Image (cartoon, coloured by chain):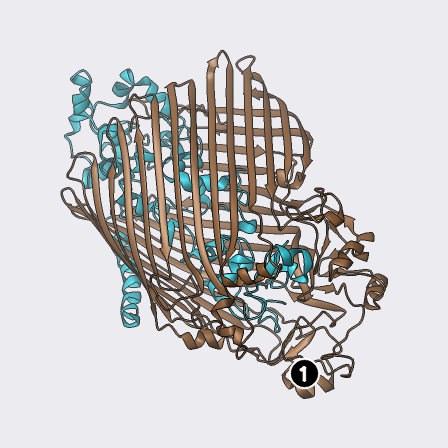
Chain colours: A cyan, B brown
């Protein structure tokens, strides 16, 4: 496998650079929905006369227009939004017209002239998640959306409209729910429930949210973690004191924080996956005190009680994440 | 999916931007401002563990103020949000968006409240925790109890109780995060970012001198991590390319701290008994009863830096095909000044150095550590064939430690005992390669059937294996878009094999040869999830979910006898949501979780003691946990005239059993030296109601009420009469008052304790 890695690392770098070369040396055009449709339409290219104009749309769908004003798609000053005139200006000089509603819903003249025939316009509610998503990614493919295609949610037919609503948003970022936790819980209820546990990150206090750690649109890291290249590297972005490196490292700690911690919540102190000392005793089957039976008799009669109550093992081995002390081999200093 | 979630308002956000360009000849966009001033009074009462009630919040009595402001013009928008103004959990956010500039900024304060009932006899400042010298001398002379060593001394109690002072043990994380995005052209963005995380306050920390001389201290922490980012991003209709550089620096203001020994006031070192002169302090067992230093010194997490360069790109190819790739390189440096081998002046002598020459000086004065990281991904996803989506991904991640070896064969344990049982530091390298392929068929109405395979190879040094190989097959079915039902199901089977398992390495490090470390051991894993949502009518949603998983270690490796043998978890939820119209939304959800695990160990002395190989010394730990959740909510948005009412109730409980078993337990029980540990249980109730009444278009009044109740029973919590659930009648009736001196340790008393808290906010708000 090492030889494969030796081959594939440069290949991965070459792929990234090649993609950049293709992107950069391609025609330098603005990424607007209108030009998307002209050059590589997510919808079928339509004759110019097939467009009805936003005013026509709003004559029946006034409520949709009102709802749209609450979101960034209405910001005409940003070149990429449906309400920006940039797309039409490619052909029509300094027109102030914009693609508007039809930038996403496709040409609507036929729909309007057929007394609102729903089959004559693009209705996202009737599209499969993948088909609906193709419209959105015609613009939203940058930065945090760059790894959408083939991502975990994409593969499971979770599309943009599964979580977002342009016209009926209930929360920030045009989510369909009032909060991220409420939205994610629709599929990940068992995970979100963990935030109710005794030891938890400050998610239910609204200090963190699911997207604080995860990029649900696709990520380079495992588990859709948005930072770093491994679980531990992701955790280090906020917990840099654990990053080290240190002279004496605790190998399972360095490899994966979730070997010992459950980041979503736990009923054990410090979000450990099991209570100490029993967590440590799963690996430390040696001689003397690590595999000692720690139970109620010791708790009440022996100084070994300090391995059971309070901080347990880490009252001595406090530097369990790694020690930078010369005498820190056993993580005591 | 026909479910309609309640359309509610998030926070206090009101936007009044007009729709620009709404007609073929659009009217000019208007300028508007809006916002909310929300101010009132907050009142909190708490019984029990007040800090646990607050935890990450500041719920003190006082003025409660929030502010929201929005301004929109034809050329830019500006939003500002301030919450909990003036409190330790305040948040301030700013958003600016114009044609060429996007700016997001946030300043957030998050407290971590450990305990307000904590007590300590130590006087701790940044870098030092001291203890009364006179009392230490008394303890050293045998005239007083420092740390209780037996039941008799428990009854006497520690002399340090007389000087232990109550204090609020708490810390706070202050976060500043900002990102500026400048669209230099329609295709090119310049990106600048800064993140700063500062942690100050105190936190409980272990610092000990022997197995029976352990202390928990409220050490002072003061550190900051600062990240700077600069990058560019190029995008066209074909794709995008992004490159950025990040510099992260973790600055440790308190690189080490010293802490006094509760059992001694002067340095000492003697092996065995009084027959051996002071200074002959070698104890081959490495054990010490604390007759060592007057004080110890602990190294804190060191300052370090991480520099990262990141490339990523995405390109849209013909036939609905997309490719993306990324490559990241990082360099992590740590060169903190090293503390000495020991603080003990009885060890830092020529006599000891004659026997332990390496302890005379450090091999080097600073850590000189360097670790490089690299991560790369390449993905291709294609819908070239109708109804068939193919995806392939390759990913690698590596950690390479280039640090020069640090010779630590001779070192000092607990600042008390010099030993030669150490060794050199080991460079811990990791290389991980992952290939994932999947195919999804969407030719059946509303359905996606997906099969996939993932191969993950993890290589590392230093440990009992040279790595492992995971092969995971999965199949899933998703039914979405149907009028009445949404269904998602997934099953995964995974088999892990180790690479070059070395039983000799396990035994060489003192472990039982049949021990396997569960994070690198051979394993069979099965996981499944099932979610179904029914919408018989558009206003009603009924959902059910099930998730189950099992890890089998001993079944994957017949030579494994010790360590974690298996674990299993099963979670299910059932809920209902009813939204008859935009004004009413009610719902409830119940969930149950069960977790089982089994581990085996052997209580033994080292070989050649016969206990080392005696199966009658085996014991098991069965750790089972059952958790129940319940959530209910009612949201009435203008269902009553001019009134918004939101109420929610959350409940969570846990019952965790720790059951010892096996022949060793039977032997201990027969000798009346075994008492089964009681279950650890907790129950948490959380109720909120928020009522807002609009007196007029702009003005309103509001009332918010929060109730929380937490009950907990944990044998690891020591109160004045001992462990909570193991009463000691001779010490009197139990109370919930923390006790800081128990067998073998002086602590702060921090543990899991119950509370009941109520917070009310009465406010007025003005919308403009």
Q: Which residue is mark 1?
A: B360
Is B80 rendered above or below residue B308?
above
Is B178 rendered above or below residue A180?
below
Viewer can see residue B126: yes
Where residue A76 appears, as percent x and y from the top left, is 36, 31
Question: Label 1's element?
Answer: helix
Where residue B72 appears, as percent x and y from the top left, is 46, 28
Task: Judge from the rendering whether residue A236 lies leftward or rightward of residue B159; answer left or right.
Answer: left
Task: Judge from the rendering whether residue B211 lies leftward or rightward of residue B247; answer left or right.
Answer: right
Q: Quadrant of the N terminus of chain B?
A: top left
Query: Toward which corner of the image does residue B416 lie, by quadrant?
Result: bottom right
Pick the front one: B123 or A261:
A261
Task: Judge from the rendering whether residue B218 lies leftward or rightward of residue A24; answer left or right.
Answer: right
Query: Toward which corner of the image does residue A190 lie, by quadrant?
Result: top left
Where residue B432 appears, as percent x and y from the top left, is 35, 64
Where residue B760 appears, as percent x and y from the top left, is 63, 26
Name the chain under label 1.
B
Residue under the point 51% across and 57% down: A279
Viewer can see residue B100: no
Is B629 rendered above or below residue B430?
above
Task: Judge from the rendering whether residue A18 lies leftward or rightward of residue B38; answer left or right.
Answer: left
Q: Quadrant of the C terminus of chain B?
A: top right
Residue under the point 52% across and 70% down: A286
């Amino acid at each position: 496998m090492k030889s494969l890695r030796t081959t594939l690392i440069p290949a991965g770098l070459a792929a990234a650079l090649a993609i950049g070369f293709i992107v950069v040396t391609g025609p330098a055009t603005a990424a607007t929905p209108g030009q998307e449709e002209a050059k590589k339409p997510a919808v079928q290219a339509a004759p110019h006369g097939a467009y009805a104009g936003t005013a026509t749309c709003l004559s029946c769908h006034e409520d949709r227009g009102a709802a749209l004003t609450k979101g960034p798609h209405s910001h005409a000053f940003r070149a990429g939004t449906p309400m920006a005139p940039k797309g039409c200006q490619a052909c029509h000089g300094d027109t102030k017209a914009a693609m508007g509603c039809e930038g996403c819903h496709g040409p609507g003249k036929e729909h309007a002239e057929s007394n609102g025939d729903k089959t004559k316009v693009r209705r996202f509610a009737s599209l499969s998640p993948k088909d609906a998503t193709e419209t959105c990614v015609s613009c939203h493919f940058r930065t945090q959306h760059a790894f959408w295609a083939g991502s975990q949610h994409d593969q499971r037919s979770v599309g943009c409209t599964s979580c977002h609503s342009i016209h009926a948003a209930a929360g920030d970022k045009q989510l369909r729910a009032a909060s991220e936790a409420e939205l994610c819980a629709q599929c990940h209820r068992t995970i979100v429930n963990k935030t109710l546990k005794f030891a938890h990150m400050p998610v239910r206090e609204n200090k963190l949210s699911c997207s604080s750690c995860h990029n649900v649109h696709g990520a380079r890291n495992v588990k859709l973690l948005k930072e770093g290249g491994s679980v531990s590297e992701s955790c280090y972005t906020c917990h840099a004191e654990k990053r080290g490196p240190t002279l004496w490292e605790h190998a399972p700690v360095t490899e994966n924080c979730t070997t010992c911690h459950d980041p979503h919540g736990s009923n054990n102190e410090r979000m450990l996956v099991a209570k100490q000392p029993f967590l440590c005793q799963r690996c430390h089957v040696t001689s003397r005190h690590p595999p000692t039976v720690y139970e109620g008799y010791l708790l009440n009669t022996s100084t070994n009680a300090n391995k059971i109550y309070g901080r347990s093992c880490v009252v001595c081995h406090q530097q369990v994440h790694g020690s930078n002390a010369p005498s820190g081999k056993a993580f005591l200093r | 999916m026909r479910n309609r979630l309640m359309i509610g308002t998030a926070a206090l956000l009101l936007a009044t931007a007009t729709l620009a360009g709404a007609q073929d000849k659009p009217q000019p966009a208007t300028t508007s401002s809006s916002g909310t001033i929300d101010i009132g009074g907050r009142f909190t009462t708490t019984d029990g563990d007040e800090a646990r009630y607050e935890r990450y919040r500041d719920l003190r009595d006082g003025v409660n103020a929030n502010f929201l402001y929005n301004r929109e013009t034809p050329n830019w928008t500006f939003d500002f949000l301030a919450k909990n103004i003036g409190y330790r959990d305040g948040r301030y956010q700013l958003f600016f968006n114009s044609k060429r500039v996007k700016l997001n900024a946030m300043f957030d304060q998050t407290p971590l409240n450990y305990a307000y009932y904590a007590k300590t006899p130590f006087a701790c400042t940044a870098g030092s925790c001291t203890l009364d010298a006179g009392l230490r001398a008394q303890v050293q002379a045998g005239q007083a109890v420092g740390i209780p060593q037996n039941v008799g001394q428990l009854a006497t109690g520690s002399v340090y109780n007389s000087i232990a002072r109550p204090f609020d043990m708490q810390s706070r994380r202050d976060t500043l995060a900002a990102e500026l995005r400048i669209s230099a052209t329609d295709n090119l963005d310049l990106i600048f970012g800064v993140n700063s995380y500062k942690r100050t306050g105190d936190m409980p920390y272990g610092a000990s001198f022997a197995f029976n001389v352990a202390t928990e201290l409220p050490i002072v922490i003061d550190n900051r991590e600062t990240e700077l980012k600069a990058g560019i991003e190029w995008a066209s209709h074909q794709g995008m390319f992004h490159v950025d550089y990040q510099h992260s620096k973790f600055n440790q203001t308190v690189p080490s701290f010293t802490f006094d020994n509760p059992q001694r006031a002067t340095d000492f070192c003697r092996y065995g008994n009084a027959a051996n002169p002071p200074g002959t302090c070698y104890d081959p067992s490495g054990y010490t009863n604390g007759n060592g230093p007057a004080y110890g010194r602990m190294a804190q997490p060191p300052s370090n830096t991480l520099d990262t360069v990141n490339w990523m790109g995405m390109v849209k190819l013909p036939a609905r095909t997309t490719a993306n790739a990324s490559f990241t390189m990082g360099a992590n440096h740590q060169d903190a000044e090293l503390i000495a081998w020991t603080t003990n002046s009885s060890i830092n002598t020529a006599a000891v150095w004659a026997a332990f020459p390496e302890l005379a000086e450090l091999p080097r004065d600073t850590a000189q550590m360097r670790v490089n990281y690299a991560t790369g991904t390449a993905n291709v996803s294609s819908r070239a064939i109708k109804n068939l989506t193919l995806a392939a991904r390759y990913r690698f991640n590596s950690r390479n430690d280039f640090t020069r070896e640090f010779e630590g064969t001779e070192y000092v344990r607990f600042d008390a005992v010099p030993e030669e049982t150490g060794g050199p530091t080991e460079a811990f390298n990791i290389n991980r390669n992952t290939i994932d392929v999947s195919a999804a068929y969407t030719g059946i109405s509303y359905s996606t059937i997906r099969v996939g395979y993932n191969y993950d190879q993890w290589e590392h040094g230093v440990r009992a294996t040279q790595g492992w190989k995971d092969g995971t097959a999965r199949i899933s079915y998703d039914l979405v878009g149907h009028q009445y039902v949404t269904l998602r199901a997934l099953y995964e089977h995974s088999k892990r094999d180790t690479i070059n398992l070395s039983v000799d390495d396990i035994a060489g490090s003192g472990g039982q040869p049949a021990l396997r470390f569960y994070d690198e051991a051979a394993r069979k894993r099965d996981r499944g999830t099932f979610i179904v949502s029914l919408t018989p009518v558009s206003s009603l949603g009924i959902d059910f979910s099930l998730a189950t998983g099992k890890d089998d270690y001993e079944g994957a490796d017949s030579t494994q006898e010790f360590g974690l043998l298996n674990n299993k978890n099963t979670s299910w939820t059932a809920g209902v949501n009813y939204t008859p119209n935009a004004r009413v939304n009610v719902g409830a959800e119940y969930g149950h979780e069960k977790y089982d695990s089994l581990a085996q160990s052997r209580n033994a002395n080292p070989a050649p003691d016969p206990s080392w190989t005696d199966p009658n010394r085996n014991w098991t730990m069965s750790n089972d946990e059952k958790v129940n959740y319940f959530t209910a909510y009612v949201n009435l948005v203008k269902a009553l005239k001019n009134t918004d009412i939101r109420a929610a109730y959350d409940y969570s409980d846990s019952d965790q059993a720790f059951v010892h078993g096996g022949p060793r337990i039977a032997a201990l029980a027969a000798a009346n030296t075994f008492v089964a540990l009681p279950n650890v249980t907790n129950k948490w109730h959380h109720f909120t109601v928020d009522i807002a009444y609009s007196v007029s278009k702009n003005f309103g009044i509001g009332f918010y009420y929060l109730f929380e109740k937490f009950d907990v029973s944990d044998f690891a919590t020591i109160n004045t009469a001992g462990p909570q659930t193991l009463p000691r009648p001779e010490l009197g009736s139990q109370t919930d008052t923390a006790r800081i001196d128990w067998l073998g340790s002086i602590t702060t008393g921090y543990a899991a304790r119950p509370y009941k808290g109520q917070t009310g906010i009465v406010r007025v708000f003005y919308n403009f």
